[in-house]
Amino acid sequence: MANAGRGGRQAAALGATAAEGTRTRLRAARLALWLPAAVLAACQVAVVLTAPSGERPTALETWVGPEGVLHVSGSLYDSTRFTGTPFGGLVLTPLTRTAEQALGRGWTLGTLLLVVALGLITARALPRPAGRRTAILAGPVAVSLLMLSLPVRDTLRLGQTGVIPVLLVLLGCLVARGQRVGGALTGVAAALQPALLLFTPLLWLTGRRRAAAATGAAFAAATALAWAALPHDSRAYWAHHLAGTGLGGPADDPANQSLHGALLRLGLRGPLETGLLLLLGAAVVTLALRRAVRYAHDGQLLLAVAVTGCAALAVSPTAWQHQFLWVLLTVAGRIGVRARDRLVWPVAVVLMMTLPARTLLPNMALLHPLRDNTVLLAALAAATAVPFLSRRSPYFRTPVPTPYAPARFSCVPPSFPRRVLIRPNLLLELLLIRVTYAAYAQVRLAATGGSNSAGRARAEAHGHRILGLERLLHMDVEHAVNHAVARIGWLRESFDFYYTSFHFVVPLAVLGLLYWRRPVDYRWARASLGFTTLLALAGFWLYPLAPPRLMPGLGIIDTVHGVQDFTRPDYGTLTHLTNQYAAMPSLHFGWSLWCGLVIAVIAPKAWTKALGLLHPLFTAAAIVTTGNHWILDAVGGALVVGAGFGLTYLLQGPRARTAVAAAEIGSGPPALEKDRAAG
């Protein structure tokens, strides 16, 4: 008996110790997640507080006005700069002096607290099986994502009030205990943003009829109060401006991300646009409400609320970017039966809500309709098309796992990125490649301080050093080769075409073929190209170098860009687009060498391998004959390519063929066939 009692006490002590260790790790993880959230919040506040009062592009001025527009006896909408409802103007009137005197302090800090509350409520409302621990850790993550998002950044920078209606709806639908209280909060939100009346049918169809009635009553009471206090403004808003149409700027302005604005940007006008808007709006509302009701009955109330909010903004006459927090909230939904697809929607939403559209899509006329309506398309997709999983689906908690190859070294922790044996999701891959290239272009330009004139002297000094080293090594042939080729018209044009055309076409073609035909090889090839580019960016930053064509006094003929005027600080046809001093190492040669080596390794026939290796040789000749690079730049490009392949092998293990063989031995033929079928 004594031994049994002692054993029970020891087990209890061990259990208590384990529980205490778990709590300690949880507190440490929570602190680690709150730190970046606090840093992001501080950065956003600093942007507002450090801006000179005369340079603050704040929307508070749109309702404060030069003399305080809410102080004067005229209409709120005389200048069309105030975009809120009359009830919003009535509520903001007592806050005008506070906002005017503390443009960056009280108003900004108050908005910041509202954003934190929004993040915590969102984390708390995650659908089960997410438990209390997940909600605790998800809170700072949600706050960080909100701080990074363009709607919150615009809200803090411009002094907007777009967070308040979203917060009121979430409080009413997810937090408030009584239906009448929750409905009243939602009704007040609708009085501030009329499109949110769409939550009334959602509440009714989900069985919360008292809340739906309270929503309508609160909206009517708030609107009537504003009509009694501001009758002229109420008539102007509801009758003349048709619930806000045309306020804040032209309705076809790209900032208006509603269906109405999109149709106007497509050139539709008059009855045709009105009829099509009503038809599309009815379809969006019907589909969105059906999906929202289904998600609500499924226990995903946060997703149901987010879907309804997206639909409300889409059918609203005007919907500004700072109001689109609803799109970010749809990250709570899960899509994809396979683990590799699970991140597609969250990553796409985060990128669309944190980066400008010009970063996500290239500047091509064909893509301008997509660029002008990126946020609207995301909202429409979330409201009507994205196949969010039901909680009853067997894949909701446990998607089809992704097969991995063994790690290169046994000391590599299991949590470290491992070699995946199937192709990645194509949409996610294209999106990340585009964003990575946009970041590459920005870093490359920033390497000289944002302009070529800022780094010109240093780059030219480095150019003289490179030329001196080449003369010492008896390899300074750039001038002789450049002038010899420039005299032969067809040869000069051939090298110019090769230099300008093959730099992007060949790497993209290689990546595309690998993705389609050799998905396992695609991953290590793509990783090595990524490492190569990152190392090259470090070279551009640390060692800006003027190419031969931009070195005064050398007499190099720029066969591609034409004659350069060296008397201008920023000269050349491309100086306003990219860093002309990003020459060391040469990514023209580096990417071509990467293509040649990948083809030589993958290609099954000798003639194909030889053809692949000719590409870097032709590229090396092109970059020298056109005057765009020194020979040592190509040497630097070869070094970063070698380092890229080395890092890939070190971190991810052997090449794909070896990895597949190892997986074959470890899992057996049936498992391997299953993995390939999953890919």
Image (spheres, grey):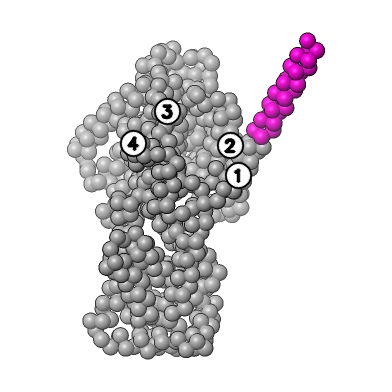
Q: Nearer the viewer, residue 300 or 270?
A: 300
**For the residues carrying marks 1 and 3, which lies nearer the camera in this image?**
3
User: Identity of the amino acid at label 4?
Assistant: Ala
Q: Is residue 641 above or below residue 351?
A: below
The span from disc 1 to disc 2 (Cα, nearest Å) is 8 Å
The span from disc 2 to disc 4 (Cα, nearest Å) is 27 Å
Residue 2, magenta (yes or no): yes
Mark 4 highlights which residue? Answer: 381
Are circles 1 and 3 on residues that touch, CB within 8 Å? Answer: no
Are circles 1 and 2 on residues that touch, CB within 8 Å? Answer: yes
Q: Earlier in the sequence, mark 4 or mark 3?
A: 4
The span from disc 1 to disc 4 (Cα, nearest Å) is 30 Å
The span from disc 1 to disc 3 (Cα, nearest Å) is 29 Å
User: Identity of the amino acid at label 2?
Assistant: Pro
Q: Earlier in the sequence, mark 1 or mark 2?
A: 1
User: Identity of the amino acid at label 1?
Assistant: Pro
The span from disc 3 to disc 2 (Cα, nearest Å) is 23 Å
Mark 2 highlights which residue? Answer: 140
Mark 3 highlights which residue? Answer: 396
